[in-house]
Image: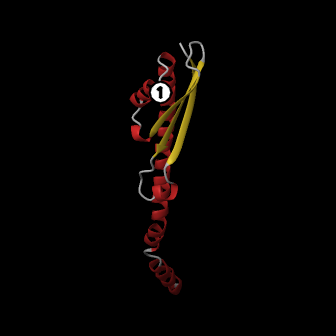
């Protein structure tokens, strides 16, 4: 009876440190997955901002159908980096016609390690509106 107890205790003692080794092996993978999730959230936020900028650019182009007015409205409506943002107008600029504003943005992947694997993401949104 005594012999069984000592072997059970010895086996328990031999497994000390196992959790530490498992954590050391799994932690880098967990951190990388968490960083990818955070980066996906940042890109999703930029996507919403691009759609908002396209809506504002189309609205400005409906009132004053010039590329400069549309670009100024797109830049002023969001916190997107103006150097990564392009605004293109298409369609007719005559009153009663439809003008389309297309906003393209290159969303940066700024988190360490994630940027090496994913790279920058190209986002685009197009909104059509009636010229006033």
Q: Residue furthest bottom?
A: 3
Residue 132 horizontal/vertical position (percent): 53, 12
Dot 1, how many residues are within 10 Å of its Cα: few (below 14), some (14-19), or many (20+)?
some
Left or right: where 73 falls relative to 104? left
Say which of 46 and 26 sits in front.
46
Which residue is found at the position 47% from the left and 21% from the top? Answer: 60
Q: Position of residue 28 (x, y in %)?
A: 46, 64
- Place of residue 78 in the rendered image (x, y in percent of width and height, measured from the top left): 41, 31
For the point 46% across and 54% down, the residue is 35
Residue 95 lies, with reference to residue 32, above or below; the image says above
Q: Position of residue 95 (x, y in %)?
A: 56, 13
Confirm whether residue 70 shows in the render: yes
> How many labels, in total?
1
- The residue shown at (47%, 23%) is 66
Residue linked to disc 1: 67
Q: Is residue 81 visible?
A: no
- What's the coloring here? secondary structure
Image: 128 above or below 37: above
Task: Say above or below: 42 vs 55.
Answer: below
Position of 82 with respect to 41 (left or right) is left
Q: Nearer the viewer, residue 26 or 36?
A: 36
What residue appears at the point 48 percent right and 40 percent down from the top-left corner?
A: 105
Q: Secondary structure at mark 1?
A: helix
């Amino acid at each position: 009876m005594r012999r069984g107890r000592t072997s059970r205790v010895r086996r328990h003692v031999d497994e000390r440190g196992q959790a530490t080794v498992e954590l050391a092996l799994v932690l880098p993978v967990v951190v990388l997955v968490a960083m990818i999730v955070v980066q996906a959230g940042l890109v999703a936020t930029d996507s919403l901002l691009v759609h908002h900028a396209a809506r504002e650019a189309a609205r400005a182009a409906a009132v004053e159908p010039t590329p400069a007015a549309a670009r100024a409205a797109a830049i002023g409506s969001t916190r997107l980096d103006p150097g990564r943002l392009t605004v293109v107008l298409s369609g007719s600029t005559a009153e009663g016609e439809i003008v389309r504003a297309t906003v393209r943005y290159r969303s940066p992947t700024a988190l360490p390690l994630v940027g090496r694997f994913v790279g920058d993401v190209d986002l685009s949104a197009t909104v059509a509106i009636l010229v006033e």
